[in-house]
Amino acid sequence: MLTKETNVKVGNYLKKVRKNKKVPASELVSTLGYSQGHISGIENGSKLIPSKSFISKYLRAITNDNFSEVNYYINEINEIASGEIELATYIDESTSLMDAFVNNFESDSSKLNTFVEELQNGDNKKDYYNFPINDLKFHLIDMNNQKYFNKVLLSADDREHIKEYIENYIELKYKIYLKQINDLYSKNKLDEKSYKQEYYQIDRILKAIKGENHGKL
């Protein structure tokens, strides 16, 4: 299917993406049906990539079925392979990388402050509060009320660690996305106006998560 040289390049690219996503190779074993050693061999180029479906399953596993990301990586692999293979992209409601991330920063407080409850008759009841009931950060820093996870009481230390985990995850997610749009822009696949709009969105999100001193993107 692939020459040895291209097999190494594609394998190395898969490994690079997996490490950027911070997904251990051990987590792919059950999904891909190969041992961790075999997967590492494919990534390092010592073993052949068995099929196109392996690549697709691999990408879906490390992106948690985020088809917009999968399509981005597929297009990158198609370029690396230079026609030796042609992987098909997925048709999904979020096939566009841009569409998948636009407007993810919620500045409309009404959505943050509205709690929707389904009644027994199937109708929805909306309750409005003067605090952001749907914002996890509010609950994690609210010291006036005890908080639980599946009935387990969370200590102040628990809450701080959970908040840090969420912040780090979201920061990583958007920095990975930034790398993707930087790459698209450098290859003239993204116009300057769209690039600046997305950059602005990412900057807003990171400032909301990490504060004004989140660092240069």
Image (spheres, rainbow, N blue to C red):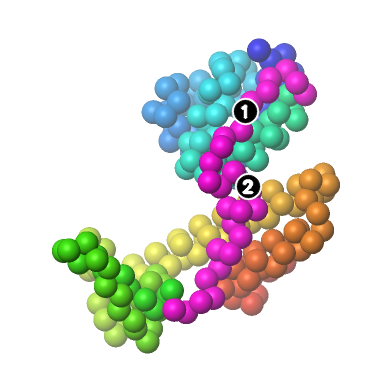
Most extreme residue toward the left, as rendered?
120
Query: Which mark is drawn over residue 88?
Result: 1
Quarter of the image with the C terminus is: bottom right
Position of residue 87 relative to residue 66, above or below, is: above
Answer with left or right where residue 4 lies relative to residue 150: right
Residue 61 in the image: state x and y as whole percent.
Answer: 48, 36
**Residue depicted at 69% across the width and 61% down the height:** 198
Residue 103 within the magenta-colored segment of the rendering:
yes
Q: Are marks 2 and 1 in contact (CB under 8 Å)?
A: no
**Residue depicted at 61% across the width and 54% down the height:** 99
Amino acid on which the number 2 mark rests in the picture: Ser
Prevailing secondary structure of the magenta residues:
loop
Q: Which span is picked out in magenta?
A: 82-110
Quarter of the image with the N terminus is: top right
Query: Tag 2, which secondary structure?
Result: loop
- Picture quadrant where residue 131 is located: bottom left
Disc on the earlier residue, 2 or 1: 1
Q: How far apart in space, not on screen, are marks 2 and 1 (Cα)?
A: 14 Å
Which is more toward the observer, 72 or 121?
121
Query: Tag 1, which secondary structure?
Result: loop
Residue 27 in the image: state x and y as whole percent.
Answer: 43, 35
Residue 216 in the image: state x and y as whole percent.
Answer: 72, 66
Amino acid on which the number 1 mark rests in the picture: Ala
Give the residue number, with chain letter if any, for mark 2.
96
Answer with left or right where residue 96 lies relative to residue 119: right
Residue 79 within the magenta-colored segment of the rendering:
no
Position of residue 91 relative to residue 126, above or below, is: above
**Residue depicted at 58% across the width and 53% down the height:** 100
Structural crowding at the residue carrying mark 2, measured as other residues with C-alpha within 10 Å and reported as few (<14), some (14–19) or many (≥20) = some
